[in-house]
Each structure stands twice: as C-alpha cells, then as structure tokens.
Amino acid sequence: MNRLWRMAVQALRSLWAERGYAALMMIGLVIGISSVTVIYEMGEGVRSQVVSMMSSMGFGADAFFVASGNRRAGFRRGGAARVLTDKDLSEISRLVNVDLVVPQLSISRDRVSAGARHTITGISGVDIHYAASRRWDIAQGRFLVEADNRDKRRVAVLGASTAQELFPEGSPLGRPIRIGTSPFLVVGVLAAKGFAPSGHDRDDRVLVPLSTAQRRLSKEDKFTAARVNLVDTGQVSETVEEVREILRANHRLGPEVPDDFTIVTPDSILQMVTRQSQAMVAMLTFIATVSLFVSGIVIMNIMLVAVSERAHEIGVRRAVGATRRDVMAQILMESLLVAVLGGLCGLGLGMLLSRGIGAGLGLPVAFSLPGFGLSFLFSAGVGLVFGVFPARRAANLEPVECLR
C-alpha cells in the first residue's frame, strides 16, 4: 500500500512538472466524460418525472387502466375503437382482487364558452370517484357528487388552465358556461397539476357527470376507459389476465383476433419510457465513447512523446536499481491519474452542463449513480488501456542508451 502511495505521489509530481502535456491529455477525457454524464442525468431526470407524474395522477401500483381501442407503439390508437360497456365493467368489478372500477367517457375536444370568452378543450364524463382515485385535490368549490350523476345535472368541474382561460377576472364558482350548445353550471375547480412530459397540459379539461355526458353530449351509453383499483397489489398480472379474458369473451374475439382494447399498467408505461430513453442513451453513449477512444489515442501519443523526452530520467532510475516493472508501473500510474483527474473534471462539468441545459430548456435532470459509475470506469479504463504501450516502451529502454 505504501509503495502504491509513493508511486501516486511521484506520478503527481511528474504530471505537475509536465502540466502542459497533462492538460492536453485531459481535454478529450473531460469532453467525453461530461457528455456521458449529461446523457445519463437527463435520461434519469425524464424517468423520475414520469414516475412523479404517475404518482400525482394517482397511477400507482394499486391500479391499472382499461381503454377502448387497440393502442400500440406508445398507445396510439389503431384498429376499431370498440367501446367498453356496462356489462364489461360490471363483470370486472366482481373479480375477487378488484376493489373499485371508475369509468370515464372522453369526448372529443369541444368549444367551451363563458360570456364572450371561449376555449377549445377536452370534455370528460366521469364517475364521482374520479378525483379521489387519482389523488386530485379540489382548489375551489366541490367535486361531483352522487346526486349530480343520479339526476343527470348540468354541472361541471374545470381544470385550472380552463378556469383561468374562461374566468381570468375572478372565481368561476356558480358561473354558467356552455359546452357546445349545452348550458352547464361550474361547481368546482381542480388543483393545478401542470404539464406532462409529453407537453400536454393536464389542467386543460372540463369534467361533467358521467350520466350527463352520456345523455346530453355523446347520446350513447358507453365508456371509453376505466380505472381499476386493486385489493392486492401483488396480483396485478393475474388480475390483468382475468380482465383480458372477460373483455375478449364479451367482445367475441377469436383466438387470432387482436384485442380491441388496451390495458395500461404502471409497469407498461415505465417499460415504454425506459425503452425509449435507453435507445437514446445508447446512441449518444456510442458517440461519447468514440470521443473517449480518440482521447485515449491522444493520451497514448502524448505519453510516448513524454517517454522520449524523459529517457535520461528513466535511464538514471534504471541505473540506481529500478526494474523494468517499476518503470512500467510508474508510467501506468501517471496515465491512470491523468484519466481519473480528467474523468472527475468531466463529471463536474457534466453535472453543471446538465443542470444548465435542464434549466434553460425546462427539462428534468436527476443524479444518475449508474452514469456516475460508468463515467468513472470509462475514464480509468482509458488511462489503463492506452497507457500500456507507452509504459512498455519506457520499460524496454536500455539504461546505457538513455544515459548517453
């Protein structure tokens, strides 16, 4: 251990004496490692934001969504948009592991007016448990109650953005609005949730009683989605398969016919986000690796030049008893220290850059321990691998020739 410490101290002294060369060798490493750090921190930030968004929407491990239509490749609609029926949701609610089924009817975006002001926003007919199941607080007024649904009342709860757009001058509570041509009364305003990672404004919406939406807006007894709350979160996959069997049987789908519905679980969203971020990270990491490879070649060539210029020093060391192994270990230690110092500088610069980019572009950033470890291993590996040839070159120098 003492020998390694002495070698490290001697290597630092040598690098300080040749600090111009050391700086040149570190520049490429700093650029490459900082790039890797930025890539991983941005990727981890996106993943953390998606998890946070799911939690804020009440989309935890205790629930999953069933939506009409077959949605693939990021849940885009494909194929017939078969709706969910009362029979579907009734049979799902009777499953042993199902605690609650919260139906929803999403209506295409429509014009919502309040006096001379208007906006185009999404309209949804929802169950009275909609807000509670998604842990969505009420900022003003109240949410929908059983009497609203039972009596098909024309009442509405506005998202924060919609409320601000229609009533910028004051509270919208008790104020009339028109959805299309139908009059409604505002009874509540949802707490602000902000934008989703996709850029969608989650506060741009209007919620009305489910029965009212079916009778006055869609004119059909149907549902476009339902949130399924579970009793035992350890049986999510089993319950999902039971729900799939019920819907396929009710929709009379043959063995070769694909599902005409989509089941969205928290794991499926995380897997989708992870696949997309991994593809991006892999591509950018390859580019950063090329930069590190070039840095390694630069280190090797500069070390070869340094070995040539230090031939007399190496000859003296060999003359006083240093072995080939001692010389080789010393040069390798210098190469490793250059790489590690460059890696640490790159990590620091990468963290600063990632936070600057995140603040400037409004993108999420989070510390990535795997990215930190990978960057450090990359830098150390470059120093060891590309320091071998100069070290062998120095070790093979003949003392007599060096001292002439």
Image (cartoon, rainbow, N blue to C red):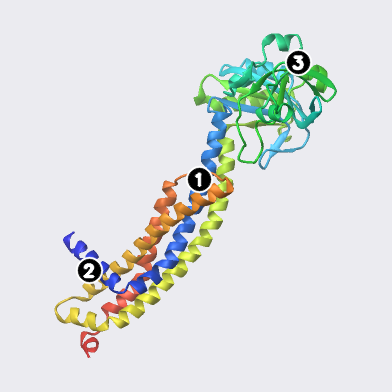
Disc 3 residue type?
Ser
Q: Residues within 10 Å of mark 2 (few under 14, many from 20)?
A: some
Q: Is residue 280 above or below residue 169?
A: below
Q: Residues within 10 Å of mark 1 (few under 14, many from 20)?
A: many
Residue picked out by circle 3: 211
Q: How many marks?
A: 3
Q: In the rendering, at what x and y percent does residue 166 appear?
A: 74, 28
Quarter-of-image position of residue 159: top right
User: Mark 3 falls on what kind of element?
Assistant: helix
Spatial CA distance of label 3 from label 1 is 43 Å
Residue picked out by circle 2: 10
Q: Earlier in the sequence, mark 3 or mark 1?
A: 3
Disc 2 residue type?
Gln
Q: Depth-wise, is mark 3 or mark 1 nearer the camera?
A: 1
Residue picked out by circle 1: 365
Front position in the image: 374 or 365: 365
Quarter-of-image position of residue 263: top right
Q: In the rendering, at what x and y percent does residue 81 appear?
A: 77, 32
Residue sitting at x 37%, y 67%: 385
Relative placement, left or right, of 83 versus 332 is right
